[in-house]
Amino acid sequence: MREFWIIFKQAFTSKAKSKSFIITTALMIAGIFLLSNISKIIDTVQNVTGAGDSQEVLQVVDESGIIVDRLQAQLEAGEYDISVKAATESEAVLDDKVSSGEIESFLALSVDEHGTIHANYTTMSMIDFSIPRRIQEALQSIQTELKAEELSLTGAQVQTLFTPIQFEQKNVSRSAKSEEELGQARVLVYVLMFVIYFAVILYSSMIAMDVANEKSSRVMEILISSVSPVKHMFAKVLGIGSLGILQIIIYGVAGFIALKTSSTGVPGEFSDFLSIQDVSISTLVYAAVFFLLGYFLYATLAALLGSLVSRTEDVQQMIMPMSLLIVAAFLIAMTGLGNPEVGYVTYSSYFPFFAPLVMFLRVGMLDLPMWEPLLSIAIMLLTIFILGWFGARVYRGGVLMYGPSRSLKDIKKAIQLGKE
């Protein structure tokens, strides 16, 4: 075991001390704090530049003469940063001013013989949809007021016309959760799916690259003379896996601190969006379990594939099939986020290479019987055992193979070489 821990320590410390790991970790932490405080940063910039105090001045050509004052009242009641000003110039002149950039926009209003408001909003901006939408909402309210006055309706009678119906949804599916529970679980499942996906693909590729790098530098020949290839493989897997877990814990602590320090208690802010206080403990436990199982599954496969190549340039080509499996699992999980009870999601959750993401999606979004996730976990454990046994045989001969690696057909050659 002494040789195992030496390689484990070497794999852990060499990656932890590398500049790429330190810089990546620092940038991710900075990004987490930046994202959680983005609203404060925007408000600060607006206050410094004065952009937050600027108010859009909208020139209005009102042919009827009865709408412009009502429009101003509606926009003020809605707390919109739009000031209405009755235009003294014609539409043609205002159109030329918009084209030349003298003014941002203008609004032309008229009322037909049926009392219907017609509005034409002219602007040079192709991406600003908020102001026209606000104006349209205000004009719709004015249209309702005009029709109510025409029909001599009181305010209370108008309100009754827009009283919403009482609609409740009852789901009799045994695995369905309530809408509140789904809303709480969906965000966490979405975030953790990304964490599992990127962590598995990143750290698995790191293992394959590390093995190939040792072979290309001829260090492997020295290592296998003092320690068995099997110990070497699993020491690599556990060493880099431990580093990955540590990095994720660092990100989690940084995220927790960032959300706590950025929280102002205002409902609807970013910290409320990522709140996990109402998420069940079982969902968090399943997230940890499927992350670890997914990592060991793909890491063992990555070590196997990495042992077949002699140059780091060939690693990405060799692990491409593994990467496609992870991408396929992620796509299935993402498409099943809206309807986790669909058939292909259910069936794929028992496929070991898809289970880390897809079964976690199902246990997070649905109330499943205990045997379903346990069966998926058992299948993954069995697959890891078989892949570890087979991978050790391939690894034993693969680390001794040099020269260009052509395809996965080299696995047979590696097994034969390992028997010698």
Image (cartoon, rainbow, N blue to C red):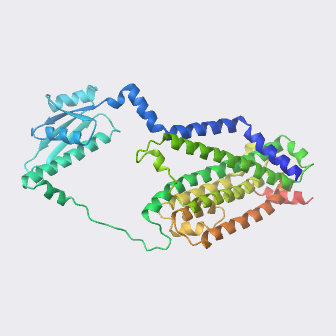
Front residue of 268 and 35: 268
From the top left corner, tell me how far across and down residue 395 is, in percent.
82, 55
**Residue occupying image coordinates x 62% and y 49%:** 198
From the top left corner, tell me how far across and down residue 306 is, in percent.
77, 50
- Image mark count: 0
Question: Is 60 placed left or right of 240 in the picture?
Answer: left
Front residue of 127 and 83: 83
The residue positioned farthest toward the front in the image shown: 265
The C terminus - image quarter: bottom right
From the top left corner, tell me how far across and down residue 61 is, in percent.
15, 35
Res 389 quadrant in image? bottom right
Q: Is residue 377 visible?
A: yes
- From what the image shows, is residue 142 above or below residue 106? below
- From what the image shows, is residue 135 above or below residue 149? above
**Residue occupying image coordinates x 27% and y 26%:** 100
**Residue occupying image coordinates x 56% and y 38%:** 31
From the top left corner, tell me how far across and down residue 340 is, in percent.
51, 65
